[in-house]
Image (spheres, rainbow, N blue to C red):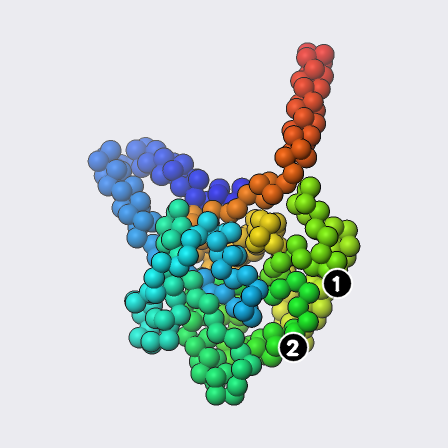
Amino acid sequence: MLKKLSNNLIGVFDSVKNALSQSDFSNKEAETIIDRLKLAIKQENPPKIALIGQCGVGKSSTINALFNAGRPISHIEACTHIDTSEIKDCFEAYDTPNGTILVCDMPGLGESIEADRKNIELYKKILPEVDVAVWIIAAGDRQLSLMQYALNMISIAMDDDCLSKVLFAINKSDIMYPNNWNDKINMPSSEQEINLSGFVETVKKQIKAVVNNWDSKIIVYSALKAYGLQELLLEMLEHAPKKRRWIIDQYADVANFLDNVDPKVLEMINTMMSQKENKGSDMNECNF
């Protein structure tokens, strides 16, 4: 489902070619147009993603899980038209199977007045440049006041267009109290579900206290368990500019949730689905 944008590119090329062949364009002219379209897509700038959150919330593991990325391969020397050394140092290139993505691990706020003044200026330069910013919070974090303080500073300094790129996500759902993740089905236990729901509501209240018109989803996921990653990617696409959504999807290579499900459970599910299909086939034969 998530790959429908990128998987359909070949189909789009074929459709355009067929439409051109039925017009006054010659086959050679149609091929030239298609080649130019392919070149334009190939030359499109790679995704730029900002990560916001305290140290240890799982920012690198999130990028790895969404894009099958390795360690950052280099600092980017000219990733933006803004000639600011802080921006050059902020972005790092992550090598993925689908190409290189640019990621900026944003500095935290609340360290000191002087550091905050400098860092908020960096936010004002970085956020307009990125496609989407993911604000990651660790499940059960008891220091949400720091998040609220930082968000308040950013909301004062930034316009609504920049803030619309920011989505909030709760990582490490697998270690939410009472830390009894259901490993068989790779999902939170019933107790964790209750606590995660309560934590989501707490985070929402903290956000709305400083951003009055905020009304977005908060995604709960676990980068380690590959749980909720598809929902996280979909929400990233929603927050990105429309003209850039396809490129993020093109580069995505989401870790498989089923890889962490107990093989016996998968076998049982496959057996049940096979029996259901066979039963449906038998009914169709009887109706015929």
In the figure, is residue 207 to the left or right of 243?
right
In the figure, is residue 138 to the left or right of 105?
right
The front one of 128 and 161 is: 128
Q: Which residue is drawn at 36% across and 39% down?
A: 13
> Measured along the vertical axis of the image, is residue 275 above or below residue 236?
above
Q: Which mark is residue 160?
A: none
Amino acid type assigned to the residue bearing label 1 in the image: Gly
Give the Cα distance between marks 2 and 1: 17 Å
Callout 2 environment at 10 Å: few (<14), some (14 to 19), or many (20+)? few
> Measured along the vertical axis of the image, is residue 116 above or below residue 32?
below
Amino acid type assigned to the residue bearing label 2 in the image: Ser
How many tags in the picture?
Answer: 2
SS category of the residue bearing label 2: helix
In the figure, is residue 134 to the left or right of 265?
left
SS category of the residue bearing label 1: helix
According to the picture, the residue beneath numbered tag 1 turns out to be 198
Q: Which residue is drawn at 51% across and 57% down?
A: 61
Counting from the top left corner in percent of width and height, residue 85 is at 33, 76
Q: Residue at x 48, y 62 (%)?
A: 132
The front one of 20 and 67 is: 67
According to the picture, the residue beneath numbered tag 2 turns out to be 145
Residue 280 in view = no
Counting from the top left corner in percent of width and height, residue 24 is at 26, 36
Q: Residue at x 48, y 43 (%)?
A: 3
Q: Which of marks 2 and 1 is nearer the N terminus?
A: 2
